[in-house]
Amino acid sequence: MVTFLAGGTGTPKLLDGAADVFAPESTTVVGNTGDDVEIGGHLVCPDVDTVLFSAGGVLDRERWWGIEDDTTETHAELARLADAAGLDDGPRYLSDEAQTAGRDIARWRRFSGVAEFMEIGDRDRAVHVTRTSLIDEGQSLTEVTRTLADAFGLGVDLVPMSDDPVATIVHTEDGSMHFQEYWVANRGGPAVEGVEFRGSDAATATDAVRAAMRDGVIIGPSNPVTSIGPMLALDGVREALAETTVVAVSPFVEDRVFSGPAADLMRGVGREPSTAGVAESYPFADAFVLDDADGTDLDRPVVRTDTRIDGANDAERVAEACREALEVVG
């Protein structure tokens, strides 16, 4: 049995080849939900959906977002209507009062659907409509995610980190904004001054997540701040990780990040943007998988390999290094 903590694209890329190393039926994937947003009344779960679409064989692997060959007619028409009506484009937050009204799971991250700032494909949108409708019928996010996983034929057990709302808010020189506004709308441009996981003080990890963390845990090369950080902010998660075997893959090669905003975010929260900074962020990790070119000296066991993941063969190689690391400290 093994459990992956997944956020962004780093861990999903690792999962792309992990099935040849770890049996899918014995694998649980815990998805980050701090990046979730509600747009036009529909709950979008980007990190959960990347795993859902990847393991379901439909992910657009050029963008690592959305469904391959999806059409975007609805998205295009929303933009046309906004332009024709002279409406400002997005991101358009709903009012402060609306941010805590309606369905609880969408708190602090509600955006208008006018000129939606995230490009959502038509088939992709059907997933969000189904998810939101099932939640409105009374199902939890965990229950809905398993229903969608069945629809996509997943072999792994995919669960969200919590059924409670946790919103990743990035505090920048241009003001506070939801992570999706920071990364998608502003392309990670504003200087980061801090990161808040709003709602985490009242949120809890689900029973499914707590049970999964009793197995060996692998943290893939995801962003430590906004992909893994929301999970670590939940009550009891750090303690649970301290009591089990944890292997982490660094998203850095010394001080060079493979992709994404991890370096800027780590610097913005006062952490060294490097493999050493990742190790400091994960004091509960028993071992690390580092790139062959990464000479960082850590105080824990290290397994080295080529950690760049450009395809399934690369992912299998890194997954095999994770298996070796688990055996070293298991």
Image: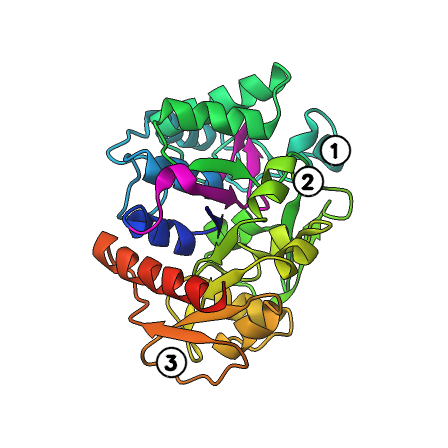
| 47 within the magenta span | no
x then y, percent, for residue 110: 62, 35
x then y, percent, for residue 112: 57, 32
Q: Quadrant of residue 164?
A: top right
Q: Which residue is mark 3?
A: 294
Mark 1: which amino acid? Answer: Thr
| 31 within the magenta span | yes
x then y, percent, for residue 219: 48, 58
Q: Earlier in the sequence, mark 1 or mark 2?
A: 1
Q: CA distance from mark 1 to mark 2?
A: 6 Å
Q: Residue at x 55, y 75 (%)?
A: 277
Given contact means CB atoms under 8 Å apart, are the residues at marks 1 and 2 in contact? yes
Residue 41 seen anywhere in this rendered image of the structure: no
Residue 108 is marked as 2
Residue 100 is marked as 1
Determine whether the residue tagged by mark 2 lies in a helix, strand or loop. Answer: loop
Q: Residue at x 31, y 39 (%)?
A: 59
Residue 231 seen anywhere in this rendered image of the structure: yes
Q: Earlier in the sequence, mark 3 or mark 1?
A: 1
Mark 2: which amino acid? Answer: Trp
Determine whether the residue tagged by mark 3 lies in a helix, strand or loop. Answer: loop
Span shown in magenta: 21-45
Q: Earlier in the sequence, mark 3 or mark 2?
A: 2
